[in-house]
Image: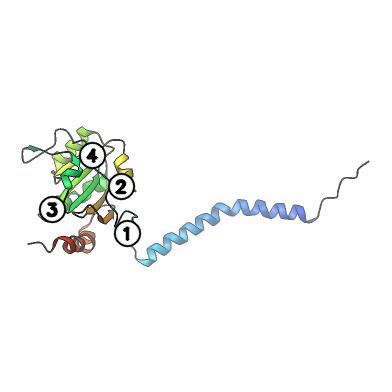
Amino acid sequence: MTERPEASPGRPAAAGRRRLLLAFLPLILFMALAGVFLYQLGSGKDASEIPSVLIGSRAPSLALAPLEGLNRDGVPVPALTDAAVAGRLTLVNVWASWCVPCRQEHPLLFALGQDPRLTLVGINYKDKSENALRFLGELGNPFAAVGIDPAGQSAIDWGVYGIPETYLVGPDGTILFKQIGPFTEETMASRLMPVIEKHAGPAS
């Protein structure tokens, strides 16, 4: 008759330690993430300064259908295509009518739309056209061209984290700048305008 091996005295203790570690693992992970978050706050870094791998690379191709029914100065606003922005310093804003921060930054975009040094265009993200038209009808249309992105595919191509997001694209198609989240007067003055002035000169 084969004798059963005696259980090692160390096995129950080791199993207990593993169970204890598994029980505390979520707490450990939470504390690690909280530590990273607190470090970011303490460092004074702006959450909108998440680096983009697209900066310095060529902007994704644009071939988006127009927002039907949208006019500017009595003329239909064209679709957002490569031809609409070719050879121009262009600010590409990703927005939607259901986006509360988009509404907050809209007056600043409206002012930018008057700047002759650049062309402001919009990607309308996962929105209903009637809601988008109502949004721009209420707040004004700052865009020289608007393309609809109902499935969000173009936003994926641009590496969008969440809207609003804005990209400054050079005349040669190179992405020069990315803003995550809504602009404020401070971020526009301290971050965006210096890049515009570098590539287009000071406002006249």
Mark nearest the camera among 4 and 1 is 4
Residue at image mark 3: 111
Q: Tell which circle, 1 or 3, labels the residue nearer the N-terminal end.
A: 1
Task: Locate the N terminus by quadrant.
Answer: top right
Give the number of marks. 4
The structure's colour scheme is rainbow
What is the three-letter code of the residue carrying label 1?
Glu
The answer to whether the residues at label 2 and label 4 have Cβ atoms under 8 Å apart is: no
- Residue 20: x and y, percent? 65, 53
Q: Is residue 72 left or right of residue 51?
A: left
Around disc 4, counting alpha carbons within 10 Å, would you say few (fewer than 14), some (14 to 19), or many (20 or more)?
A: some
User: Horizontally, is 176 left or right of 53 in the view?
Assistant: left
Is 44 drawn above or below residue 72 in the view shown? Answer: below
Residue at point 20% right, 55% down?
170
Identify the mark nearer the N-term, 2 or 3. Answer: 3
Image quarter where the C terminus lies is bottom left
Of pointers 1 and 2, the one earlier in the residue sequence: 1
**Label 2 CA crowd tier, 10 Å (few <14, some 14–19, many 20+):** some
Give the mark nearer the N terminus: 2 vs 4: 4
Q: Nearer the viewer, residue 173 or 129?
A: 173
Q: Does 132 sit above or below residue 109?
A: above
Give the amino acid type for the residue marked by disc 3 in the picture: Ala
Identify the residue position indicated by label 2 in the image. 158
The kind of secondary structure element at disc 1 is: helix
Residue identifier under label 1: 49
Residue 138: x, y in percent? 14, 40
| Label 2 SS | loop
* Residue at the spot of label 4: 63
Label 4, label 1: how many angstroms apart (C-alpha)? 28 Å
**Residue at 32%, 61% in the rendered image:** 46
Mark 3 secondary-structure assignment: helix
Mark 4 and mark 3 lie on one chain; the one further toward the N terminus is 4
